[in-house]
Amino acid sequence: DTAVSQTPKYLVTQMGNDKSIKCEQNLGHDTMYWYKQDSKKFLKIMFSYNNKELIINETVPNRFSPKSPDKAHLNLHINSLELGDSAVYFCASTQGGGVTEAFFGQGTRLTVV
Amino acid sequence: QKEVEQNSGPLSVPEGAIASLNCTYSDRVSQSFFWYRQYSGKSPELIMSIYSNGDKEDGRFTAQLNKASQYVSLLIRDSQPSDSATYLCAVNPLDSSYKLIFGSGTRLLVRP
């Protein structure tokens, strides 16, 4: 049973489209994250939520809107996709913040053409 | 200035050798340090965490932390081809525990 699962695994879409990525964790954790990994493998925090509340918004464009309906889910909606949005997006979860082990989902490879 | 820096590699070692991976960090970051391993096309997975100065050993892996010199290292003894991956150093910044700051990773290649 997958601890942190993301869907879809691959997403190919045209510039200007709107798309969503879903994430669910069954670990009982209270904190969830979105990270972006670019083509150079640099992994960078985008958002973090603790108990459904937004804690970190790391200067991400307004086109990106996360939503946490409950502690086990964190979705990411992206409007007006741009070429530069192409990357792998990872969802992760921890219990109580980043000082404990982060469990990552399998990633969503987004390609904007 | 980057907050967490790693040599991108690749670091190539023969099977059975010791692989030494290094990471330096700026003085803004906290005292929680992590090493993640990421295989190509896969997600990062935690292999070591270290919180205080000194060494921490877990099987073939040893993490070393030196806060005075602001570096953390990972030693892999008896390297195996299956250890070939990218190793990501990560830290919690002082201003928030609700994020990890990652280095760009060091690619390790273990030659059979």
Image (tube, helix red, strand yellow):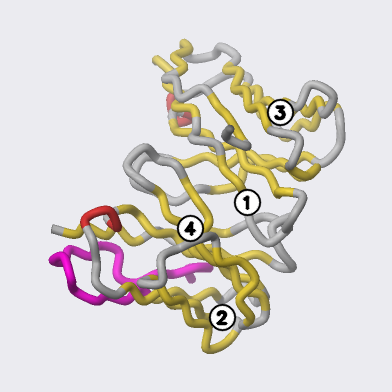
* Residue A17 part of the magenta-drawn span: yes
Residue identifier under label 4: A35
| Quadrant housing residue A36 | bottom left
Q: Nearer the viewer, mark 4 or mark 2?
A: 4
Q: Mark 4 falls within which chain?
A: A
Res B39 quadrant in image? top left
Chain at tag 2: A
Q: Estimate the spatial distance between the alpha carbons at disc 3 and disc 2, rounded to whole Å.
A: 33 Å
* SS class, disc 3: strand
Asked if badges 4 and 2 are on one and the same chain, I answer: yes
Q: Is residue B55 above or below residue B17?
A: below
The amino acid beneath tag 1 is Leu
Task: Report the residue at 61% width, 35% height from top.
Answer: B4
Q: Secondary structure at mark 4?
A: strand
In the picture of the structure, the residue carrying the numbered disc 1 is B100
Look at the numbered discs 1 and 3 and tell me whether their residues touch, using CB distance below 8 Å.
no
**Marks 4/1 same chain:** no
